[in-house]
Amino acid sequence: MIFLALLVACESSSEGESNPFDKPHDPDKAVLVEDIGPRKGGLGTKVVVSGSNFGNDKEKVKLYFNEKEALILRVQDNAIYALVPKQPGEYSTVRVVVDGKESTLAETQFQYYIKAVVTTVAGRWNVSSNPPIDGPALDATFYRPAKIAVDDIGNVLVADDQSGARMRLISTSENKMTTVLNMSVPWSTTFNEQFTHNYVMERNPGARPILFYSLSKASNYIESEIFYDQQDDQGNWIFGSYTACALGADDTYVYMMSERGERFVRVHQETRKVELIGMNIPTGQYSHMTFNAVDRKMYLSLEASGRIMRFDPKHVPEGRSTPWITWDDMEWIIGTGLVSSISKEGPGREAQLGTLCGLGSDHEGNVYICDQKFHCVWKVDPLLNCTIFAGPPAGPAVSGYRDGKPEEALFNRPYDITATFDGLIYVADTFNRVVRCISIQ
């Protein structure tokens, strides 16, 4: 009823009648929020927030559902016409700010309906070909899609491991997959924080002194440059002939760790200077890295123990010289560290995870982790609550291949994961030989 009444008033004014509510905000009076209609909906639902003293300049008005800002379509003094933002929470407190004056809708909350789905976006299920085939995304094939990264406009880069020996580009806008770089053994891949370059390491120690390649977004990832290892003052290679494993990047450096933590280096993205920042970190075996742009920490997953570690890569303890990062500088935040036949959700170190592989983070500080043992994707929120985000529920391992709702979807040893700024999650579902997308709206 509120929506219709206000809409009629708006339409009447557009037909030439004077609109008594087409007037500016009065800075000497309070802003008042009285109601919202409808009170339920999902992403993009059109709503009208009624009240008083909103004014008629939408540039001076902000509307929030919890902490998410809504897109405002039109404003008049007694009404704000807007679209519901993405995932503000199951129940949202509605808040309006006009020229610094704020008002909250009391007692009534907006209920948000979540729509979630897992879909296959590239590759053919259970088809591995050598050489891999380019073309329309769902007709193309991988050899073994292992590691994955996505830029800020939805281009997905996939390291096709082993005999695949190449980097693949999935254009989600054009629905096609192409090869952009042939390599020896491509492995971990990541973007810098500015999304101008994608970095992909050479895992094979036989490829040294090559550390990794840089693919330029400006050339649609066709142009690449090589970052090489360097020698220290004694003539020794800084990274050396180790198998590379974990890779991460922030706004300045690319961070690279060897398979068993023997060497941990950072490479300046502009000067290309290689620095040894850690040695002999007991990761067990394979580890994987992601930079969380919210808390500015690096997250490290350990396959052997099902644990997540966290550390500040730029913090240098007082009195410590290079290399300065040790095992003692890493905070154990997720996982019991014990091997179990069942998984269990829970807070922090009470959660029981399996073989943790690639991980990625989103713009809200959530971290997503692939679990090969339990064939699922975990989500760790900023409070370190650990829950299954997609795949079979906590308990015994269940593998398979099925699209649909996240809680009903099935994976087969997913190995890496990445998130877009607007919340799409891409998964390298390695042993199903496909790339999947988890869309939560």
Image: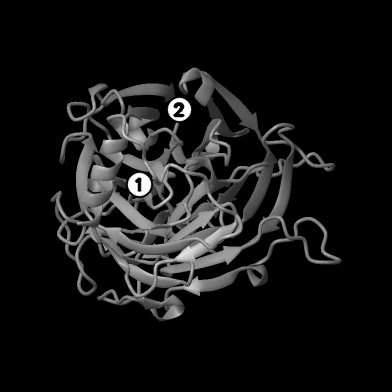
Amino acid type, callout 2: Met
Amino acid type, callout 1: Ala
Q: Given contact means CB atoms under 8 Å apart, are the residues at marks 1 and 2 in contact?
A: no
**Whether residue 177 can be seen here:** yes
Task: Out of 8 and 417, give the one closest to the viewer.
Answer: 8
The mark total stands at: 2
Q: Residue 202 carries which label?
A: none
Please identify the residue farthest to the bottom as the structure is shown. Answer: 350
Task: Tell me if residue 106 comes above or below residue 271 in the rendering.
Answer: below
Q: Where's residue 255, x and y in %?
A: 61, 47
Q: Residue 82 carries which label?
A: 1
**Whether residue 302 can be seen here:** no
Direction from residue 206 to residue 90 in the image, left or right: left
Disc nearest the viewer among 1 and 2: 1
Q: Where's residue 224, x and y in %?
A: 54, 22
**Cα gap from disc 1 to disc 2, whole angstroms:** 49 Å
Which residue sits at x=60%, y=26%? 226
Query: Element under label 1?
Result: strand
Q: Where's residue 311, x and y in %?
A: 62, 63
Direction from residue 291 to residue 430 in the image, left or right: left
Which residue sits at x=23%, y=51%? 5
Task: Out of 109 and 296, give the one closest to the viewer.
Answer: 109
Identify the residue position indicated by label 2 in the image: 183
Query: Element under label 2?
Result: loop
Residue 315 sits in quarter? bottom right
